[in-house]
Amino acid sequence: MQNASSVSFSNSRAANRASRGVVNTITPTTSSGESQAAYRQRTRQTRYIEDVQRKARRRRVLTFVIAALVIIGLAVGAGYIAFRGAVVSKMSLGDSDAKTALVASKEGEVSYTLISVDLGAVAKPLARSGPDVLLLVRLDEDARTMAIINVPADLRITLSDSEYHHLCEAAQNGDAALIDAVSRYTGVNVSHFVKLSKSGFVDLVEALDGVDVEVDQVVDDPHAGDVYIPAGAQTLSGDAALTYLRATNLKLGVLDQMNHQNDFAASLLAEVFADDGQVGFSARLDSIDEFFQTDYSYDDIVKLQNWLKDIPVDAMTLVTVPGYTTAVTGVVENEQSYYIASANDITAIINTLDEGGDPNAAEHEVASIDKKSFTVEIQNGADVAGAAAATAEVLKAAGFNVGEVGNAEQQVYSETLVVYKDNGIQQAQAVIDAIGIGRAVYASYYYEFEADVLVIIGSDYMPTS
């Protein structure tokens, strides 16, 4: 036998047999350090054989478990992909042309999302073309801040035909035209678009089990709906939310309406992006994804939720564009009723936000108004005996400069109006605060008076005792 001398044998007899080519069994040198005899004895024992068999079974089980986990992982992955696909499909914009007008923001840049909501109308004469609410949401991920800018849907703008139109009418030419019109007015690029129909809005609110809001004043407007909403903390259902957002029969009219829309939007977004963990949020998204349409991807929304969940409602900046409406109070709004706002005002709002300031700071100047710096005329418009004189005394006692006091040409006013001229909204608000009643209305060309502010007493007047 070749190389016999290089193999270790247990004795000389075995070595001689190997040299002659006779080798029955070669027992390997053991790594355990035991003797060859002990090794041979151990490997012939039943327990050793059973150990080998048991290890083989374990390997087979482990292989099976690994294979099962791989299959389960593939199934879960496929299920997750299918889930994401279903969500994206249901909230897709479909055949909307919105994406052609969207401009993606760069990494680290502030982005703007336009939310368009159709609230419908209680009666056909009140219906109009296009969305009723337009909210421009400013998102600054680096600073972890969010601002909601209410861009009036009735804003007077000029479209391609060089004629005056409501901003919402741009939607007649498609979502892209609406986005372009908002972008031109505000001077910012819109990166994302969210669209809700009337039924989608109602269903969304219902799916969230209502939305909690702090109602600042009683809402009872037959032109908005038949739901009566008392002041105070309320959880609004879908129908109540429609009434709340449509109502203009408020102290400051359309300005209060826009404030209500902002407040509701902030609470709604807080509900949608609440921190319920990844599984909880995915489940909530799955329950509401069919009620709105957007260009946002599933991953975009999840990323958004990861930081919006930490922003409480009172930390959101809510902004309304200052201006006035040309609508005649008490008359159903017609096609010639516009919201008039300066382009300079929206530019100032955007710049203030970019500088980290609060665009609402000017609203707090009401308390510092010099009450003697403007005159107030008072007319009794509801045939309530002594109402004008009594109101005059209240204003004089509060330090206001009261001018003429008398009767209106007609005693047909159902509500008290405080009519103001250009840049006089804060004056009107100061008067309303003093008399505890009234709705601010811009004078436009429907009211003629010499004073700076005109108070017309309506049948809602309650004498003070």
Image: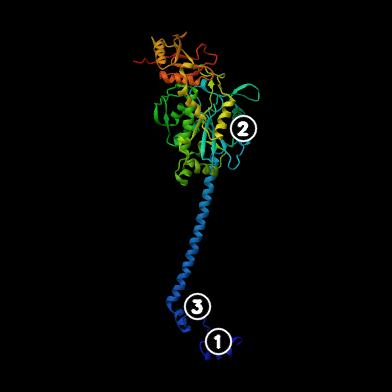
Can you tell which quarter of the image residue 222 is in?
A: top left
Query: How far apart are the two marked residues, 3 and 1, measured between alpha carbons?
Result: 22 Å
Query: How far apart are the two marked residues, 2 and 3, measured between alpha carbons?
Result: 78 Å
In the rendered structure, which disc, 2 or 1, sits on the residue that comes first in sequence? 1
Q: Amino acid at mark 3?
A: Ser
In the rendered structure, which disc, 2 or 3, sits on the residue that comes first in sequence? 3
Mark whose residue sits in front, 2 or 3: 3
Name the residue that disc number 2 marks. 176
Q: Position of residue 252 (x, y in %)?
A: 47, 22
Name the residue that disc number 1 marks. 23
In the rendered structure, which disc, 3 or 1, sits on the residue that comes first in sequence? 1
- Residue at 57% x, 18% y is 336
Name the residue that disc number 3 marks. 31
Q: Position of residue 124 (x, y in %)?
A: 51, 21
Q: Amino acid at mark 1?
A: Val
Q: Position of residue 114 (x, y in %)?
A: 56, 33
